[in-house]
Amino acid sequence: MICKQVKDNGEQCQANAMTDSEYCFSHNPDTKEQLKEATRKGGEVSYYDKGLIKLEPIDITTDNRAVIYILADTLNRVRRVKPDGSMDIKIANCIGFLSSKVLEAQKELVLSDRLDQLEDKLIEQGVLK
C-alpha cells in the first residue's frame, strides 16, 4: 500500500506505507520525532565525507613548497580514466586547472628562492641589514 499523504502540489505521496500504518515514515504522525532525529543525523554526515580518510594537515602558510606538494598530490589523486581509456570531462578540466596552478606555484617558488639569494648577497655585502 502507498502512503495516503497528499502533497502540497496535490499529488499523492508514492512512498510505501509503513506496516500497520496508512503513512510512510516521513508522513506518519507517530514517527514525527524519529523523522526529526533522522534528518538531524543525516545532516551531520556529509555525503562527501563517507568513507574518506582524513589526511594530516599541511601548513601552506610557512612553506611555498607545501603548496606545490598539495597540488601535485591532489592532481595525482584526481587522475582517473574509465576502463575504455576515456576520461570524464570534469576530471580533465580539473587536471588542466591543477596543472596550471602547479606551474604557477613552481614559478613563484623559483622567484622567491632567487630573491632570497639576492637578499643574502646584499646582506653579506653590507647593503642590507
Image (cartoon, grey):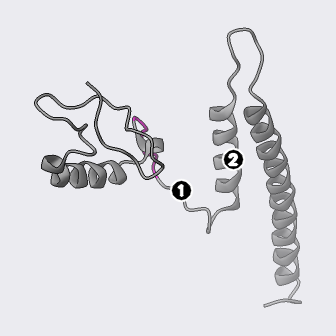
Residue 54 shown left or right of residue 126 in the figure? left
Which residue is painted at 70% across and 38% down in the image?
Answer: 75
Looking at the rendered structure, which numbered label has been put on residue 33? none
To which quarter of the image does residue 59 belong? bottom right
Q: Amino acid at mark 2?
A: Leu
Residue 54 locus on image (x, y percent): 42, 45
Looking at the rendered structure, which numbered label has been put on residue 58? 1
Which residue is painted at 48% across and 55% down in the image?
Answer: 57
Q: Quadrant of the C terminus?
A: bottom right
Looking at the image, is 26 positioned above or below residue 106? above
Which residue is painted at 28% across and 44% down in the image?
Answer: 26
Q: Residue furthest top?
A: 84
Residue 25 locus on image (x, y percent): 23, 40
For the magenta stretch, what is the residue range? 51-56
Which residue is the site of mark 2?
Answer: 71
Q: Residues within 10 Å of mark 1 (few under 14, many from 20)?
A: few
Q: Disc 2 on helix, strand or loop?
A: helix
